[in-house]
Image: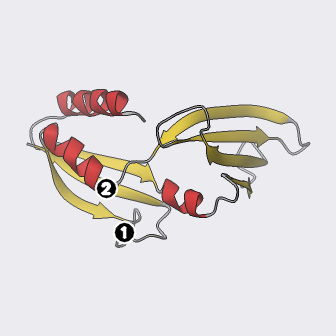
């Protein structure tokens, strides 16, 4: 998300929470994908369980060459068991480092309670797929 959308999202979250309400942010660790990029692109396939309406997805993460900012394009294609393309998503990814997110939360009157590297409350590290920020409304 860009700065404007992030600010709007946090404002809506703040207004939606009661006093001392908790906000939990689930943020993908895109740095892992960036580190795997070769020639500005990383592409991979992910199989889904039979309970999923799609059989597999093919994901492409690449540099956004049409932008002057440090952004990336994430393209996801989802296929059925007969290899028919059923759905596609494409969006721009902006890197948000933890310190930047902390700053945004503080400016929006949130207190950081904790930061985890998994829903099991593992310590955040460079190999975490996502990071989870727990913040409390002031």
Quick check: 17 left or right of 118?
left
58 vs 35, nearest the viewer: 35
Q: Are marks 2 and 1 in contact (CB under 8 Å)?
A: yes
Find residue 138 and report its horizontal and vertical position in percent. Answer: 8, 42
Seen at 33% across and 64% down, the residue is: 116
Give the crowd class for mark 2: few <14, some 14-19, many >=20 residues within 10 Å.
few
Q: Nearer the viewer, mark 2 or mark 1?
A: 2
Seen at 64% across and 46% down, the residue is: 62
Name the colour scheme.
secondary structure
| Disc assigned to residue 124 | 1
Residue 75 against residue 114 in the figure, above or below: above
Residue at disc 1, secondary structure: loop
Residue 71 against residue 43 in the figure, above or below: above
Query: Which of the 4 image quadrants contains residue 85?
Result: top right
| Disc assigned to residue 71 | none
Quick check: 45 left or right of 91?
right
Quick check: 49 left or right of 36?
right
Find residue 107 and report its horizontal and vertical position in percent. Answer: 15, 39
| Disc assigned to residue 98 | 2
Find residue 101 and report its horizontal and vertical position in percent. Answer: 28, 48
Of all residues, the one furthest to the right in this rendering is 82
Upstream in the sequence, badge 2 or badge 1? Answer: 2
Seen at 50% across and 35% down, the residue is: 68
Give the crowd class for mark 1: few <14, some 14-19, many >=20 residues within 10 Å.
some
Seen at 23% across and 50% down, the residue is: 102
């Amino acid at each position: 998300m860009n700065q404007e959308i992030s600010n709007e999202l946090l404002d809506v979250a703040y207004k939606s929470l009661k006093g001392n309400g908790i906000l939990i942010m689930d943020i993908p660790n895109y740095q892992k994908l960036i580190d795997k990029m070769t020639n500005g692109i990383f592409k991979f396939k992910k199989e889904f369980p039979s309970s999923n309406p799609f059989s597999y997805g093919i994901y492409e993460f690449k540099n956004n060459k049409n932008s002057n900012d440090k952004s990336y394009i994430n393209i996801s294609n989802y296929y059925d068991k007969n290899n028919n393309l059923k759905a596609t998503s494409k969006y721009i990814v902006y890197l948000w480092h933890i310190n930047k997110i902390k700053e945004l939360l503080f400016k929006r009157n949130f207190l950081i309670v904790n930061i985890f590297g998994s829903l099991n409350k593992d310590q955040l590290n460079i190999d975490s797929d996502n990071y989870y920020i727990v913040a409390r409304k002031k």
